[in-house]
Amino acid sequence: MAHSAVSQVSVAVPVGSDLSIRRSIFKPHTLSFCGTLWAPILTLDLSTKNARSKYRYTICMSVQQANAPKVSVSPLQLEDAKEPPLNTFKPKEPYTATIVSVERLVGPKAPGEVCHVVIDHGGNVPYWEGQSYGVIPPGENPKKPGSPHNVRLYSIASTRYGDSFDGRTASLCVRRALYYDPEKGKEDPSKSGVCSNFLCNAKPGDKVQITGPSGKIMLLPEDDPNATHIMIATGTGIAPFRGYLRRMFMESVPKYKFGGLAWLFLGVANSDSLLYDDEFSKYLRDHPDNFRYDTALSREQKNKNGGKMYVQDKIEDYSDEIFKLLDGGAHIYFCGLKGMMPGIQGTLKRVAEERGVSWEEKLSQLKKNKQWHVEVY
Ligand code: FAD
């Protein structure tokens, strides 16, 4: 009887990028087997009308994977490299990649739009988790007639294997930049962001000029798979952390067996604006000893003073633990809008001083030890 339960539900599902489909056809279950309560896993409910054939899911049956289903990937040569690839393609000679898919990530009540953009680079623009691609939108630079647009950088939101686990794609998490004219009180399309709108409007098969990969500040310290990582994101700043977390909890890579702690703080406006929440919630169920996930919903939650709940308020709630982890060598990463840093640094400074510690000294020690990683834009 136990065996039949296992064969029915021990299913590892490399999840595709369509979150709405994932939400609707995968249902969490808990089962007991040989007297042990197994972690909740996902089963595929193919009876639903949403399980349409255009979404291709690979299903591998494995009893061992039932506890913490992971996707086995064939290691890329990148796993053996000592240094990450850097600027393989430069703005003067970009790589022409192809859009695989563009999917809206947020619900109807989210202010603004964020899209998940999957790009096929054919394995020619390899990268490590935490790096960025540059994108050159089509058209002419209005400030330099006859020249292409300037490069815009986007943090890569997938692991080096990409969402299709074959090392041929990279995913970006892009906020569509719109301009609201304060005087007219409405959107002015002539001032919309060029590159983000190009990416969010792109269709499968469209060509996209990419450069990079770039950046070393947000790389994971892979020599220490048992490290603690505190990740603080606002909005699309989630991108590099989605890559980290897929590497830690979704993929099975022989050379990288994560045994440390990953703690994600994500700040967005409201619950409809949460990004990749299904993936993170699944890691919480499957890896409760290695993953913590806290969200700050500024328009839905109140902080302890009755004001809007921002990530720095969440950090303050856990400041004792965070400081202890930092004292123990934890890495702390920040990614998102520039505006997030003053509030967060103010909170950390106040908490440090309450503990009788000079924040300036602590910060310079964190930087010296390479524990402090910031990528804000
Ligand atoms: P642009 O055309 O460059 O316009 C910039 C802004 O100005 C827009 O908000 C636009 O609406 C406004 N604007 C345009 N014309 C006018 C005007 N006449 N008057 C007033 N305002 C005007 N972004 C992401 O979404 N996701 C990421 O993961 C990401 N990662 C990044 C990583 C790094 C390291 C850096 C540096 C940036 C990152 N960015 C990311 C930001 C990204 O590079 C772009 O800056 C962003 O997408 C806006 O580019 P755009 O071409 O759409 O807007």
Image (cartoon, grey):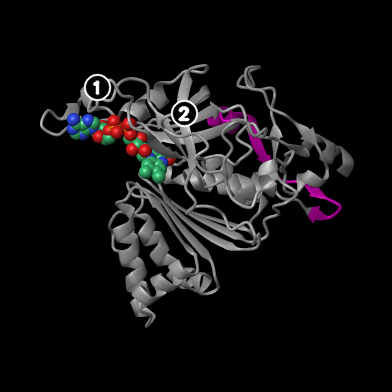
Apparent side of residue 377 relative to residue 58 in the rendered image (left or right): left
**Which element type, helix, strand or loop, lies under badge 1?**
loop
Is residue 149 something that shows in the picture? yes
Residue placed under numbered mark 2 in the picture:
94
Single out the residue that lies furthest toward the bottom: 356
Residue drawn at (69%, 28%) of the image = 45
How would you rate the neighbour count of disc 1 (Cα within 10 Å): few for under 14, some for 14-19, many for 20 or more? Answer: few
Between 80 and 31, which is closer to the camera in this rendering?
80
Residue drawn at (41%, 51%) of the image = 375
Q: Are marks 1 and 2 in contact (CB under 8 Å)?
A: no
Task: Locate the N terminus by quadrant.
Answer: top right
Residue placed under numbered mark 1 in the picture:
145
Amino acid on which disc 2 is placed: Pro
Residues rendered magenta in the picture: 17-36
Question: For residue 355, what is the image quadrant?
Answer: bottom left
Q: Check if residue 31 falls in the magenta segment.
A: yes
Question: For residue 46, what is the image quadrant?
Answer: top right
Q: Is residue 180 above or below residue 189?
A: below
Is residue 107 something that shows in the picture? no
Q: Is residue 369 above or below residue 151?
A: below
